[in-house]
Image: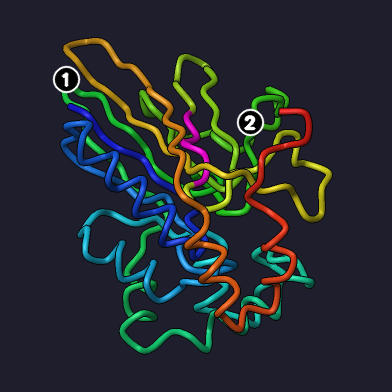
């Protein structure tokens, strides 16, 4: 069994297209979206429609919930300086888009066979705004995962690919499809966005479980064109992003 994990697409339908094209070559059995689909990028409606066509399970991210409850955006950790982008995104969507967003789940268990499961969430099983990083202290992760058991724990939210072990469980983050962060992003108000898309594949073969991380390079010119032609309030800043880090 091979399961593709995608997360944090953030209105970048061009990156999503590149990832889906690669997934088609990977012989996966299913796909799960771990949330944050529409906001921040220039293609919110197109991105939601692309995901909806897949018919895959979708997890509610903090940005997805902010679209449904914009008055709670700060509670969902959508920064104040991003509120204009959230309002612009809201104006691009119709009733069908909101119905689709409302169908998302907070968590989803996936059967891996032989009695094993994968638990999917956005930030943590307890909250879509929890951050689990490679360097997150043991006791903090224990608070996030306490009371939950699965062979694989899969979440997004941090835009950083990760695999770490916690009390025998594999904790996986596939990274971000639409806005991969330059590490370390923790203290950055506006992180640097990188010119590739990220996802992961969980592979169950017999008793063995593997995780493969993918970095997909795509042509960013159409993304820049979409940004320039959009009314996205943050487009000028985003046009400075999706470039190679200095020194590489």
Task: Tell me the quarter of the picture where residue 208 sits.
Answer: top left
Magenta range is: 172-176
Q: Main secondary structure of the magenta part?
A: loop
| Relative image position of residue 115 (x, y in whole percent) | 20, 23
Q: Which residue is mark 2?
A: 141
62 lies above or below 120: below
SS label for mark 1: loop
Is 113 on the left or on the right of 102, as rendered? left
- The front one of 222 and 74 is 222
Q: Is residue 155 left or right of residue 63?
A: left
Secondary element at image label 2: helix
Residue at 73%, 25% (x, y): give it.
137
The relative height of residue 14 versus residue 216 in the rendered view (above or below) is below
Residue holding disc 1: 114
Residue 145 in the image: state x and y as whole percent.
54, 34
Spatial CA span between label 1 and label 2: 27 Å
Of mark 1 and mark 2, the one earlier in the sequence is: 1
Looking at the rendered image, the quarter that the N terminus falls into is top left
Q: Name the quadrant of the C terminus.
A: top right
Residue at left 57%, top 64%? Answer: 224
Give yes or no for residue 224 being in the magenta stretch. Answer: no
Q: Mark 2 packing: few (<14 Cα in 10 Å), some, or many (20+)? A: some
């Amino acid at each position: 069994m091979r399961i593709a994990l995608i997360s944090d697409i953030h209105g970048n339908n061009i990156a999503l297209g590149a990832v889906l094209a690669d997934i088609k070559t990977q012989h996966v059995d299913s796909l799960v979206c771990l949330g944050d689909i529409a906001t921040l990028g220039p293609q919110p409606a197109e991105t939601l429609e692309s995901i909806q066509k897949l018919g895959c399970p979708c997890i509610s991210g903090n940005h997805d919930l902010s679209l449904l409850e914009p008055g709670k955006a700060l509670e969902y950790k959508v920064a104040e300086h991003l509120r204009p982008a959230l309002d612009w995104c809201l104006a691009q969507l119709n009733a069908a888009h909101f119905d689709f967003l409302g169908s998302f789940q907070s968590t989803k268990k996936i059967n891996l066979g032989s009695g094993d499961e994968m638990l999917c969430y956005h930030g943590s099983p307890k909250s879509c705004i929890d951050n689990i990083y490679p360097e997150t202290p043991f006791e903090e992760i224990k608070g996030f995962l306490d009371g939950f058991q699965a062979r694989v724990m899969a979440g997004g939210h941090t835009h950083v690919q990760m695999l770490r072990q916690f009390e025998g469980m594999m904790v996986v983050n596939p990274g971000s499809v639409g806005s991969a962060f330059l590490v370390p992003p923790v203290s950055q108000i506006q992180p640097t966005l990188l010119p590739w898309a990220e996802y992961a594949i969980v592979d169950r073969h017999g008793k063995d479980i593997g995780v493969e991380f993918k970095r997909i390079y795509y042509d960013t010119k159409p993304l820049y064109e979409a940004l320039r032609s959009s009314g996205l309030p943050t487009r000028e800043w985003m046009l400075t992003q999706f470039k190679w880090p200095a020194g590489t």
